[in-house]
Image (tube, helix red, strand yellow):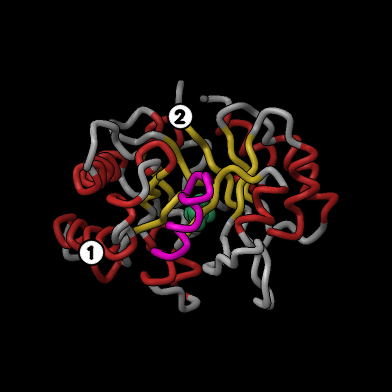
């Protein structure tokens, strides 16, 4: 199965030893492990088959590769550690105040420097309860703002850009979207972003586990998954990645 499964560890685990154990259990081709920044180097050394990801990237792009930005991590530092994928605009970051304009800047930096960018979009329940049409309208608005000038200016776009559809109400709640609705949204995202012959790849995220994973991997237009909670349990994640 030619699908991508991205493990988003968020601010977990607490200690490096646990992170290494988890990385060993996740180390399969087709998997991307996105640890907390503090573990990036060690996890990079641990993985043999899976690829290394990051959960964020600085919006700053100083010519020297570094600069006076306290707490930030640059594309340059990530690339030097072997990071291939960067998650951008996760709803948890948006909830902390990250704007579409910032997300747009980060996407351009990641793509300009040859990183694969995973742009996260998705609606809250207050939108979705009005139906899938309302959700599509919301997601189209995010895509328009987040991808402003990205499609026209960055030729690598279609090979290096992934969009993760993550309905906010499904993240960490145990309440996953229906695979057929996620499929419909994935197809919509592909149409919204279609500017060339190649299509953007769309991932689904939101309460994916070993029980529902098969239905999402088999769903039309879904090219992979972004997994949070279940990626922190070695046994559970092993079951998930067994399918790719
Ligand atoms: P979840 O998180 O799998 O715990 O719902 C997904 C995500 O936040 O990417």
Question: Residue at horizontal 60%, vertical 64%?
Answer: 63
User: Where residue 207 sits in the image (x, y, percent)?
Assistant: 46, 50
Residue 204, percent from left and from top: 39, 45
Query: Which residue is rendered at x = 65% and y = 48% of the image?
Result: 79
Which quarter of the picture shows residue 186? top left
Horizontal side of 52 relative to 110 (left or right) equals right
- Asked if residue 116 lies in the magenta stretch, the reply is yes
Name the residue nearer the viewer: 43 or 228. Answer: 43
Q: Identify the residue at image location x=59%, y=42%.
A: 84
Instruction: Identify the residue at the far front of this view.
Output: 63
Horizontally, residue 16 falls left or right of residue 10, namely: right
User: Which numbered marker is on residue 3?
Assistant: 2
Residue 90 showing in the rendered view:
no
**Distance in Å between CA atoms under marks 1 and 2:** 27 Å
x, y percentage for residue 228?
55, 52
Q: Give the residues drawn in magenta, as a range.
A: 104-117
Q: Nearer the viewer, residue 22 or 89?
A: 89
Crowd band around label 1 with a 10 angstrom C-alpha radius: few (<14), some (14–19), many (20+): some
The answer to whether residue 138 is above or below residue 39 is: below
Residue 223 in view? yes
Residue labelled with disc 1: 141
* Principal secondary structure, stretch drawn in magenta: helix
Residue 52 occupies which quadrant of the picture?
top right
Which numbered disc flags the more N-terminal residue, 1 or 2?
2
């Amino acid at each position: 199965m030619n699908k991508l499964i991205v493990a988003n560890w968020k601010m977990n685990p607490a200690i490096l030893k646990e992170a290494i154990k988890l990385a060993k259990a996740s180390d399969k081709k087709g998997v991307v492990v996105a640890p907390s920044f503090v573990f990036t180097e060690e996890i990079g050394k641990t993985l043999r088959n899976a690829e290394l990801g990051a959960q964020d990237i600085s919006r700053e792009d100083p010519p020297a590769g570094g600069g006076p930005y306290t707490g930030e991590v640059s594309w340059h530092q990530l690339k030097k550690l072997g990071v291939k994928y960067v998650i951008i605009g996760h709803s948890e970051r948006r909830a902390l105040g990250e704007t579409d304009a910032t997300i747009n800047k980060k996407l351009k930096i990641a793509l300009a420097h040859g990183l694969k960018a995973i742009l996260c979009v998705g609606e809250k329940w207050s939108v979705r309860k009005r139906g899938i049409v309302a959700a599509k309208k919301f997601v189209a608005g995010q895509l328009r703002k987040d991808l402003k000038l990205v499609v026209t200016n960055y030729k690598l776009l279609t090979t290096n850009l992934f969009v993760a559809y993550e309905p906010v109400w499904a993240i960490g709640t145990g309440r996953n979207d229906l695979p057929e609705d996620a499929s419909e949204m994935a197809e919509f995202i592909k149409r919204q972003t279609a500017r060339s012959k190649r299509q953007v790849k769309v991932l689904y995220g939101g309460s994916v586990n070993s029980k529902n994973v098969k239905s999402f991997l088999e769903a039309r237009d879904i090219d992979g998954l972004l997994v949070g909670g279940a990626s922190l349990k070695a046994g559970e994640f092993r079951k998930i990645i067994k399918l790719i």
